[in-house]
Image: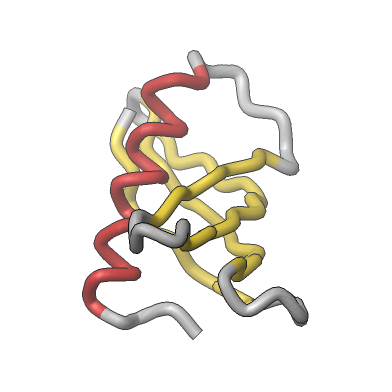
């Protein structure tokens, strides 16, 4: 499994300043084909400055979830560091 892209990132309206919520579409490669699915993710900043990222899969995916969630979390962390999130 290889994560190819996270696209269509939309920020949800939220009134808690240290918690940001997003929806997005992920595209990943399984074997010879590509699959896509909807996700929701939250980035919450702790008082210490540490960022906690939580991922929720909207569409069901027939693949072990731990490697999939880990790769999505790593990609979201990189997008956050680069300032590419809305």
Residue 78 quadrant: bottom left
Q: Residue at x 70, y 74 (%)?
A: 16
Position above or below: 25 against 2: below
Q: Residue at x 45, y 49 (%)?
A: 52
- Left of 29 or right of it: where is 21? right
Number of numbered discs on residues: 0
The answer to which of 81 and 29 lies nearer the viewer is: 81
The answer to which of 80 and 59 lies nearer the viewer is: 80
Q: Where is residue 53 shown, x and y percent of the image? A: 47, 49
Position above or below: 21 against 57: below
Q: Residue at x 24, y 70 (%)?
A: 81
- Left of 13 or right of it: where is 64? left
The answer to which of 28 and 66 lies nearer the viewer is: 66
Q: Residue at x 63, y 77 (%)?
A: 10
Position above or below: 60 against 82: above
Q: Where is residue 41 shown, x and y percent of the image? A: 59, 54
- Left of 36 or right of it: where is 1? left
Residue 80 in sight here: yes
């Amino acid at each position: 499994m290889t994560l190819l892209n996270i696209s269509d990132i939309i920020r949800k309206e939220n009134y808690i300043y240290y918690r940001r919520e997003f929806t997005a579409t992920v595209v990943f490669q399984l074997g010879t084909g590509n699959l896509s699915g909807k996700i929701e993710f939250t980035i919450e900043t702790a008082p210490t400055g540490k960022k906690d990222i939580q991922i929720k899969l909207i569409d069901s995916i027939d693949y072990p979830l731990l490697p999939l969630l880990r790769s999505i979390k790593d990609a979201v962390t990189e997008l956050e560091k680069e300032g590419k999130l809305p």
